[in-house]
Image: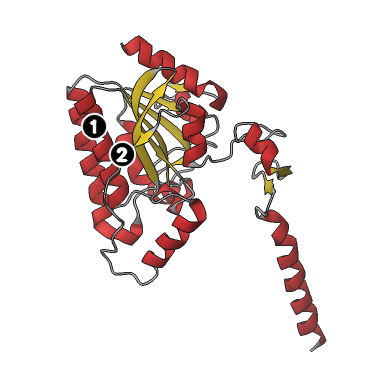
Amino acid sequence: MIVDKIKKRETTAKRTENKVDIQVGKWVKCDKCKEILYKEAVGENSGICPNCGAYFRMHINKRLESIIDKDTYRRFDLDIDTTNPLELEDYPKKIKQLREKTGIQEAVSCGKGKIKGEEVVICVMDSGFLMGSMGVVVGEKITYAIEKAIELRLPLIIFCVSGGARMQEGIISLMQMAKTTVAINKLNEAGLLYISVLTDPTYGGVTASFASLADIILAEPGAMIGFAGQRVIEQTIGEKLPEGFQTAEFLLEHGFIDKIVERKDLKETLHQLIQFHK
C-alpha cells in the first residue's frame, strides 16, 4: 500500500514537471537548447531562437508577411472543403478543432502576390494543421495554383512543410502526388520558373512529388528533409545511415538542394532569382 502511494505521488510530480515543456501563454520552449523563451522575442527575431539560432516553424500568415509585399497578397478563393472518404468518426471533429485553433481552413494557402514588386503565385504550407499533410484539398489547391501560374505566366513559389500524405484520406491522398506532378510538368513545358523552399520538416509524399521537382530548390538551415524517417530506412535496408543524413546541410553537400538560405535573406534571394529568370 505504501509503495502504491509513492508511485502515485511520483506520477503526479512528473505531470507537473512536464507542464513546463509545452507552450503556455507568452512562453515557448526551444526544442534544441531547451531554453524557455519569451514568445514575443522569438516572433521579433523572425521565429528564430535568440539563444541558439534554432528555427521555429512559421504560421502561414507570418510566412506570407515575411515574404510578400504588404497588402499585395490575394488568396485564391476555391469553394472546396475537406471530405471524409474513409468515414472516420473523429476526422471531421479534428478538422473543426484545428480550424478554430490555427485560424486557417487547411494545411496550405495559395494565392497571388508581389515580392519587391515582382508578381508571383505562391503556396505556403503550415505544419500546425495535421503536420501539413497532403489530402485532397491540399493537392487540389496546389494544382489550381500551378494552373493559375501557367494562365497568368507568373513564377511559382511553394514553401513546403509536411509529414507526407494524409492517412485519414487513404489512397485518395496518395493520388495527389500524381496530380501535382503532372501539373508541375505542364508548368515546366510552359517555360515558367518554379522555386521550392523546403522547411522543417518536409517528408513523405510531398517530398516525393512537387517539392522535389522545382527548377531551383532552396532550404532553411537545419531543415529535415526526406521520404521516410531514418529508423524506417535503416530497418528496410539493414544498414546504419550517416548521422544527420536528412538535414538540409547534408543534402546540399550531396546535390539534392541548390542552396541553404537563412530566413532573413529569403525574400531578397527569391527576388533576385525571379529577376535573373526574367
Camera sees residue 250: yes
Residue placed under numbered mark 2 in the picture: 76
Spatial distance from mark 2 to mark 1, Cα to Cα? 9 Å
- Above or below residue 3? Residue 215 is above
* Residue in view at x 34 percent, y 21 percent: 119
Give percent across and percent down for residue 47.
60, 36
Q: Left of 206 or right of it: where is 150?
A: left
Type of amino acid at the residue the image marks with label 2: Phe
Which numbered disc flags the more N-terminal residue, 2 or 1? Answer: 2
Q: Left of 7 or right of it: where is 184?
A: left
Q: Would you identify the image quadrant in which residue 81 lies?
A: bottom left
* Residue in view at x 74 percent, y 65 percent: 16
Residue placed under numbered mark 1 in the picture: 148
- In the rendered image, the quadrant that contains the N terminus is bottom right
* Residue in view at x 40 percent, y 31 percent: 73
What element does badge 1 sit on?
helix
Instruction: Tell me whether circle 2 and circle 1 mark residues in contact (CB < 8 Å).
Output: yes
Q: Would you identify the image quadrant in which residue 4 lies?
A: bottom right
Give percent across and percent down for residue 156.
32, 27
Label 2 neighbourhood size at 10 Å, few (<14), some (14-19), many (20+)?
some
- Above or below residue 256? Residue 103 is below
